[in-house]
Structure formats: C-alpha cells, structure tokens
Image (cartoon, rainbow, N blue to C red):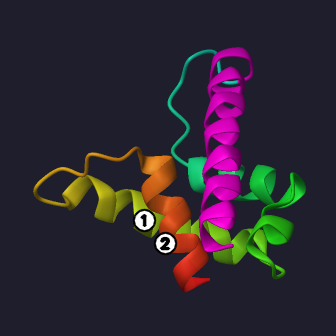
Amino acid sequence: MTDDRIGAVSALLSATEAAHGVYETADLKGVYDEEWPRWYAAYAVEHGIGAAVGQAITAERLAQFLGRSFAEFKATEPKPTETWADYTARRITAEM
C-alpha cells in the first residue's frame, strides 16, 4: 500500500514539474520562478495529492515541505541516486 502511495505521489510531482516548466516558459517568459514551491503545492493539491496520500494536505503546508525537501535533497551527500520526485514522494508519505 505504501509503495502505491509513493508511486502515485511521485507521478503527481513529476507531472507538476512538467506543468511548472510550461508555466515558467509561457507565463514567466523563461524567468526562474523563485516561488516555485507555492506553485507546485497549489497544483499538487488541485490535482489530488491529498487523495494519493490518504489525508487532506493544505497548499501552504505542502509548499513549506517542498521547499525544505528540495534544500535537503540538494545538500545530501552522497548525492541521492533517486529523482527529487521519488525522494520527496517517499518523504511526503512518511512525514505528512
């Protein structure tokens, strides 16, 4: 069951990343979105992350979590062999 949830959250985070890339290109004209955790969180909540995890998650709480997870992922030594989406999905299902 947990593996199914991790897979569902990872797939949603990957889809979120792709959609955000389109947003940065089309709406922000290629400018890096400094507020990306808020965008990701709103998108993920709107697209069912709560159902994938099995509990309600607010965009505000998720945005904070995503920002921390990204910083920790980048700082991890040795570098993780898994993608950020997989790393973060595993953490979301365990910690949220």
Highlighted range, magenta: 1-27
Quadrant of residue 3 in the image?
A: bottom right
Q: Which residue is mark 1?
A: 69
* Left or right, residue 90 beside residue 57: left
Q: Residue at x 60, y 62 (%)?
A: 6
**Whole-percent x, y for residue 1 in the image:** 69, 73
**For the residue carrying disc 2, how many other residues have a C-alpha within 10 Å: few (<14), some (14-19), or many (20+)?**
some
Q: Residue at x 66, y 77 (%)?
A: 61
Q: Is residue 45 magenta?
A: no
Secondary structure found at label 1: helix
* Left or right, residue 66 beside residue 54: left
Q: Which mark is residue 91?
A: 2
Return the residue nearer the eye: 89 or 69: 89
Q: Residue at x 70, y 58 (%)?
A: 41
Q: Is residue 73 above or below residue 92?
A: above
Q: Are marks 1 and 2 in contact (CB under 8 Å)?
A: yes
